[in-house]
Amino acid sequence: MKTSELTGAALDWAVAKCEGKKVAVCKNRRLWEWRGHGETWGDEVNYLTWNRGGPIIERERLSVVCQQGHPPFWSAGCPRAVYKGYGPTPLVAAMRCYVASKLGDEVDVPEELK
């Protein structure tokens, strides 16, 4: 799947992969993070919140800018590379940029997330 087209659970899955997290896909397309202790799963994975995605933007020093258009859209850039991400929200643009910088322009997502 093209990184530029990742949304929702597929985008969350790709970000989790970049973060080195092991996740499970539930029947309702929700993702859960593996805690690594016994047979238990941890928190629901959702990088499209400022609580989870914001620290990545800060750590990776991503720049996020609102672009004028109809409708307006967001772009994000990575200072260490030529990767860009675009999306309807700042978080989507930033997470697409992050995934592209780590995994490239194409990502092999699980079939149930396509």
Image (tube, helix red, strand yellow):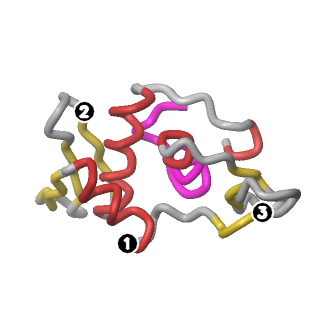
Which amino acid type is shown beneath numbered disc 1? Trp
Residue 79 occupies quadrant: top left
Estimate the x, y position of residue 98 in percent, counting from the top left.
35, 43
Q: Nearer the viewer, residue 83 or 38?
A: 38
Residue 69 occupies quadrant: bottom left
Secondary structure of the residue carrying tag 1 is helix
Which is more foreground, mark 3 or mark 2?
A: 3
Mark 1: few, some, or many residues within 10 Å (few <14, many ≥20)?
A: few
Q: Specify start and end residues of the magenta stretch as a single range.
A: 1-14
C-alpha distance separating marks 3 and 2: 33 Å
Which amino acid type is shown beneath numbered disc 2? Tyr
C-alpha distance separating marks 1 and 3: 22 Å
Q: What mark, if any, has residue 15 been given in the picture?
A: none
Instruction: Determine if the magenta segment contains residue 13.
Output: yes
Which residue is the site of mark 3? 41
Estimate the x, y position of residue 44 in percent, counting from the top left.
66, 68
Q: Nearer the viewer, residue 38 or 82?
A: 38
Estimate the x, y position of residue 25 in percent, counting from the top left.
76, 52
Q: Main secondary structure of the magenta part?
A: helix
Q: What mark, if any, has residue 83 been given in the picture?
A: 2
Instruction: Determine if the magenta segment contains residue 104.
Output: no
Which residue is the site of mark 1? 50
Q: Earlier in the sequence, mark 1 or mark 2?
A: 1
Mark 2: few, some, or many residues within 10 Å (few <14, many ≥20)?
A: some
